[in-house]
Amino acid sequence: MQFSVGPIQYFWPRNIVFDFYDEVAHSQADIVYLGETVCAKRRELKLADYLDLAHGLRKKGKQVVLSTMTLLEAPSELRELKRYVENGEFLVEANDMGAIQLLHAASLPFVAGPAINCYNQHSLCQLLDLGMQRWVMPVELSGEWLRTTLQQPEIVSRRSDFEVEVFALGHLPLAWSARCFTARSENRHKDDCELCCIKYPSGRKVVSQDGTEVFVLNGIQTQSGSRYNLINQLPEMSGWVDIARLSPEPEQTFDWLTRFQRNIHGEAPVPLSEGDCNGYWLQLAGMVRNV
């Protein structure tokens, strides 16, 4: 099994981003995803910066993938998407169907990101027909669903044509909206947000009246309040999952990478903390933590 570092979901200062990818370069990660996937107003880094990072990471032996926006809201964002598609060197992770159509029109292979709604073998076959070579399963689906889908005859015959990647660590991206919830939480209008999300490197917590952390606000993205953690499910992924994705966090991303690598075969299980969950994988409510 390989391990990937997903795109940074939060808005971090430029120097923090460069420091993070310097650590990635010296880590045991196999695959790195680069790019802004949440909000086009986050411009600490531009495509040229991501390409510079990509070249440096490739020299360190990492496979680099450029990740596209999940929700496009303006013509300028479509133009930027086309620049990603036409980068000429690196594989692209498509996070909306518009990106997939552009990549297909250019006869380019792609990664179908976790935001792509793919819930049966027929959709999976259609993505393969369009040029998909890696599929990141939607985060709300279960391990049993994955196994059942991959055992369908039309998928069995094409299983060697694509890799399967699973979001295995991080706050789950659940929804996107045209409204910026972080700005709203500060009583700001979206057009006058002053990029306030940069003050929340792990997103802004939403706590219920009983004290339960139910969501994390991350600009226009809503995340799970609990951190998804499938470290103890790695052994059962053997033969089904090719890549486990770790989503970047401000702290301990690489410590967790080491723990995941040690537990591929179940030899070093880790007790989950109260802030972790794994319910979706187990066909349970998403917030459930089953140790």
Image (spheres, helix red, strand yellow):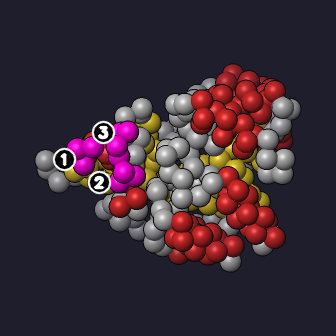
Gap between marks 2 and 3, in whole Å?
Answer: 19 Å
Residue found 42% across the figure and 42% down from its top: 221
**Type of the residue with mark 1:** Ser
What range is drawn magenta here? 186-196
* Element at label 3: loop
Query: Where is residue 209 shown, x and y percent of the image?
Result: 13, 47
* Front: mark 2 or 3: 3
Q: Is residue 100 above or below residue 21?
A: above
Q: Which residue is mark 2?
A: 205
Residue found 67% across the figure and 52% down from its top: 47
Q: Which residue is mark 3?
A: 189
Image position of 181 (left or right of 124): left
**Type of the residue with mark 2:** Lys
Q: Is residue 279 visible?
A: no
Gap between marks 3 and 1, in whole Å?
Answer: 24 Å
Neighbourhood count class around disc 2 (C-alpha, 10 Å): few under 14, some 14–19, many 20 upward: some
